[in-house]
Image (cartoon, grey):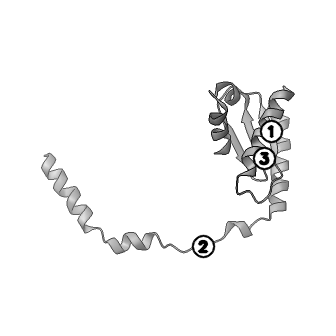
């Protein structure tokens, strides 16, 4: 039974045309998304989204923690390929280990990430993703 399955799979692999596989990697670019919205429009969209989030989710209120995370964010941004360095950090009072980013330079970090990361490099790697 196993030999029959192997023969079937091998026959299927051999029937694939290598040219078809190569052509699949050369698909045309249909649209360039960077031309769809300007950096300023993206920035304004992010600010609107951030205001909405701040109105709905509790923020973490410790200014020392927020300042520390803001400094770490700026260190990461300095070695990134960001075109627009106007960043808006939101630290949420949320126990989940998570961080997120939305268009317009908005970066969110859950307080649980700070408490759950074993060290600064681990924290930075999650924020930078």
Q: Position of residue 35 (x, y in %)?
A: 73, 70
3 on left or right of 27: left
Q: Earlier in the sequence, mark 1 or mark 2?
A: 2
Q: Residue at x 74, y 56 (%)?
A: 82
**Above-or-below relation of 75 to 65:** below
Q: Report the number of discs.
A: 3
Q: Quadrant of residue 10?
A: bottom left
Of the numbered discs in the image, which one, if any, rests on residue 106?
3
Badge 3: few (under 14), some or many (20 or more) residues near its Cα, within 10 Å?
A: some
Label 1: element kind: helix
Viewer-side residue, 80 vs 56: 80
Badge 1: few (under 14), some or many (20 or more) residues near its Cα, within 10 Å?
A: some
Label 3: element kind: strand
Query: Mark 2 — residue?
Result: 30
Label 2: element kind: loop
Question: Is residue 60 visible in the rendered structure shown here?
Answer: no
**Above-or-below relation of 98 to 6:** above
Q: Earlier in the sequence, mark 3 or mark 2?
A: 2
Q: Position of residue 59 (x, y in %)?
A: 82, 30
Q: Residue at x 76, y 60 (%)?
A: 83
Query: Mark 1 — residue?
Result: 70
Q: CA distance from mark 1 to mark 2?
A: 38 Å
Viewer-side residue, 21 vs 5: 21
Nearest-to-viewer mark from 3 and 2: 3
Q: CA distance from mark 3 to mark 2?
A: 28 Å
**Above-or-below relation of 52 to 118:** below
On-image quarter of the C terminus = top right
């Amino acid at each position: 039974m196993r030999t029959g399955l192997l023969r079937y799979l091998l026959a299927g692999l051999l029937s694939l045309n290598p040219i078809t596989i190569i052509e699949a990697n050369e698909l045309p670019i249909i649209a360039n998304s960077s031309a769809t919205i300007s950096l300023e429009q993206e920035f304004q969209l992010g600010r609107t989204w951030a205001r909405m989030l701040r109105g709905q989710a509790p923020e973490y209120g410790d200014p020392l923690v927020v300042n520390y995370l803001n400094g770490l964010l700026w260190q990461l941004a300095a070695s990134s390929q960001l075109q627009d360095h106007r960043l808006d950090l939101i630290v949420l009072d949320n126990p989940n280990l998570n961080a997120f980013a939305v268009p317009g330079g908005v970066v969110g970090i859950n307080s649980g990430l700070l408490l759950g990361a074993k060290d600064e490099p681990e924290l930075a790697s999650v924020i930078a993703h």
